[in-house]
Amino acid sequence: MITAVTLEQLKDGDRAIISALSGSDVELARLSALGLRRGVEVEMIRHGRTFIVQLEQTRLCLRPNLHTKIFVSPQ
């Protein structure tokens, strides 16, 4: 059984499925509007202080947030 990790823990090239999100209603609505929802596959393009992830044909640049977490199940 694969354990969920946070999105920030993925390395370049890793793919994962979003399994859960936690945070304020406002932040969760913002992430959903960007396409980051439960069940969506993401790929870590570049890991770092800010990181780039790809979902479908969209690339997003994100920063880790202490109050908002994206949990993923690595593939």
Image (cartoon, grey):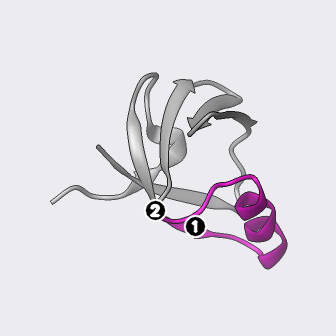
Categorize mark 2 by other alpha carbons within 10 Å: few (<14), some (14-19), many (20+).
few
Chain-order first, disc 2 or disc 1: 1
Categorize mark 1 by other alpha carbons within 10 Å: few (<14), some (14-19), many (20+).
some
Q: Is residue 41 magenta?
A: no
Amino acid of disc 2: Gly
Q: Is residue 32 magenta?
A: yes
Question: What residue range appears in magenta?
Answer: 20-38
Where residue 50 appears, x then y in whole percent? Answer: 71, 29
Where residue 14 appears, x then y in whole percent? Answer: 39, 31
Cα distance in 3D space between marks 2 and 1: 11 Å
Q: What label sits on residue 39 in the rendered view? A: 2
User: Residue extending furthest right?
Assistant: 26
Instruction: Tell me if residue 56 comes above or below residue 14 in the rendering.
Output: below
Q: Which residue lies at the image location 62% right of the left edge and 34% below the top edge?
A: 57
Quarter in which the C terminus is drawn: top left
In this rendering, the label closer to the viewer, 2 or 1 = 2
Instruction: Tell me if residue 16 comes above or below residue 23 in the rendering.
Output: above
State the SS at label 2. Answer: loop
Side of 61 where 19 appears, left or right: left
- For this rendering, which residue is in front, 57 or 42? 57
Q: What label sits on residue 64 in the rendered view? A: none
Side of 37 where 43 appears, left or right: left
Where residue 73 appears, x then y in whole percent? Answer: 35, 54
Where residue 25 appears, x then y in whole percent? Answer: 78, 78
State the SS at label 1. Answer: strand
Question: According to the image, label 1 marks what residue?
Answer: 21
- For this rendering, which residue is in front, 62 or 60? 60
Q: Which residue lies at the image location 68% right of the left edge and 44% below the top edge?
A: 64
Instruction: Tell me if residue 18 comes above or below residue 58 in the rendering.
Output: below
Q: Which quarter of the figure has residue 60? A: top right
Amino acid of disc 1: Leu
Quarter in which the N terminus is drawn: bottom left
